Image (spheres, coloured by chain):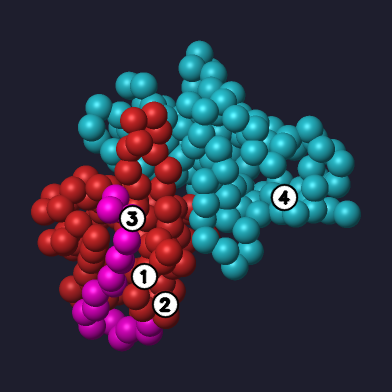
Amino acid sequence: AQRVTQPEKLLSVFKGAPVELKCNYSYSGSPELFWYVQYSRQRLQLLLRHISRESIKGFTADLNKGETSFHLKKPFAQEEDSAMYYCALRAGGGSEKLVFGKGTKLTVNP
Amino acid sequence: NAGVTQTPKFRVLKTGQSMTLLCAQDMNHEYMYWYRQDPGMGLRLIHYSVGEGTTAKGEVPDGYNVSRLKKQNFLLGLESAAPSQTSVYFCASSTHNGLSTEAFFGQGTRLTVV
């Protein structure tokens, strides 16, 4: 079964500080991992996906298959980064099942 | 470009009443999903569909039924609402572009069962 674990419900940092949101997963096959973000009063939207190896709004995430992790990092947090962040896993092999973690609420203080 | 539209946005039900939530997408996506969002529980998958006429159970399917009679619509039904089904419901759709997928979400439906 697929499972996504985000151990921190809340994370608070100061502006300019580094931030890391943790995500661990369990899945027997080759998963596709994502980070989605939900800003206040906005729809959930894709932030980045592991397959693209991209940096979006200064955020990066590396898939570590050995540790089954996909942590989200940003070297210098900004106040506008305050939001709810969800790690998600899509099963392959035609399943298309897409499951999410419980989310981490990030607050960046001035 | 509407994307994913959920109807209604808000609803209050009495225990035992039934209702249907409608999700419509205009992006010709194959895959559609229904989630519920509860404080501290994140997004939990209720049911999903990989194509017209097909549905599958997610993590928390009990008390819900779904139908995908048309590719663009995914309906979520509550036959006999219970207070435990008070939640915010999100619909999403996605497709595979050969490299990856991206799910697009609706604005949510806030349901209260009293």
The one of A24 and A55 positioned closer to us in this rendering: A55
Q: Which residue is mark 1?
A: B6
* Residues marked 1 and 3, same chain: yes
At 48% from the left edge and 52% from the top edge, which residue is drawn? B42
Q: Position of residue A31 (x, y in %)?
A: 39, 27
Residue at disc 3, secondary structure: loop
Local secondary structure at mark 1: strand
Query: Which of the two marks, 3 or 4, is nearer to us in this view?
Result: 3
The residues colored magenta run B11-29
Marks 4 and 1, Cα distance to the nearest angstrom?
27 Å
Which residue carries the number 4 mark? A81
Letter of the chain that mark 3 sits on in the rendering? B
Q: Are marks 2 and 3 on the same chain?
A: yes
Cβ–Cβ under 8 Å for marks 4 and 1: no
Which chain does cyan denote in the image? A
Circles 3 and 4: CB atoms closer than 8 Å: no
Q: Label 2 sits on what residue type?
A: Lys
Query: Marks 2 and 3, how far apart in space?
Result: 21 Å
Residue B27's tag is 3
